[in-house]
């Protein structure tokens, strides 16, 4: 269905925005609606989407926060 990781990421970002979901929830919702396991789409998640999912998880205190400099 998707030509590559970029088109999948754009679809997930659109889904997250339209349904007001986190990026991880949007990926899981996509899998649920298309009868897929998350392992089936892991190769479609590019670095940008992975970083956004990671940031969402840190914001929800599900991952430890990384040190950052406020410049």
Image (tube, grey):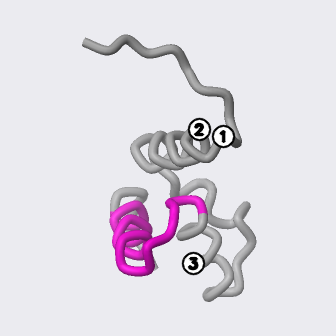
Is residue 11 rendered magenta in the image? yes
Between residue 43 and residue 56, name the one nearer to us. Answer: 56
> How far apart are the two marked residues, 3 and 1, measured between alpha carbons?
23 Å
Which SS class for mark 2? helix
- Location of residue 47 in the rendering, given as x and y in whole percent from the top left corner: 45, 41
Q: Which residue is mark 2?
A: 58
Q: Which residue is painted at 61% across and 77% down in the image? A: 29
Q: Which residue is mark 3?
A: 30
Q: Where is 54 relative to 25, above or below?
A: above
For marks 2 and 3, the one nearer the N-term is 3
Percent of width and height locating residue 57: 60, 45
Percent position of residue 45, x then y:
51, 53
Quarter of the image that includes the N terminus: bottom left
Which secondary structure lies at badge 3? Answer: helix
Tell me how far mark 2 sits from mark 3, CA to CA: 22 Å
Write the start and end of the magenta stretch as one range.
7-24
**What residue do we see at 38% from left, 65% from top?**
13
Residue 67 picture location, percent across and down: 51, 14
- Nearer to us of marks 2 and 3 is 2
Mark 1 → mark 2, Cα distance in angstroms: 5 Å
Q: Quadrant of residue 48?
A: top left
Do tag 1 and tag 2 residues touch (Cβ < 8 Å)?
Answer: yes
Residue 22: which disc? none
Which residue is pictured at 68% across the width and 35% down the height? 63
Q: Residue at x 67, y 28 (%)?
A: 64
Marks 3 and 1: which is nearer the front? 1
Front-most of residues 2 and 13: 13
Q: Quadrant of the C terminus?
A: top left
Which residue in the protein does label 1 denote? 61
Q: Please determine whether, in this image, residue 64 is positioned above or below residue 68.
A: below
């Amino acid at each position: 269905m998707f030509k590559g990781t970029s088109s999948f990421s754009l679809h997930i970002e659109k889904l997250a925005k339209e349904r007001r979901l986190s990026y991880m929830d949007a990926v899981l919702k996509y899998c649920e609606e298309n009868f897929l396991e998350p392992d089936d789409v892991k190769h479609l998640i590019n670095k940008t989407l992975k970083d956004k999912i990671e940031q969402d998880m840190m914001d929800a205190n599900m991952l430890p926060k990384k040190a950052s400099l406020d410049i």
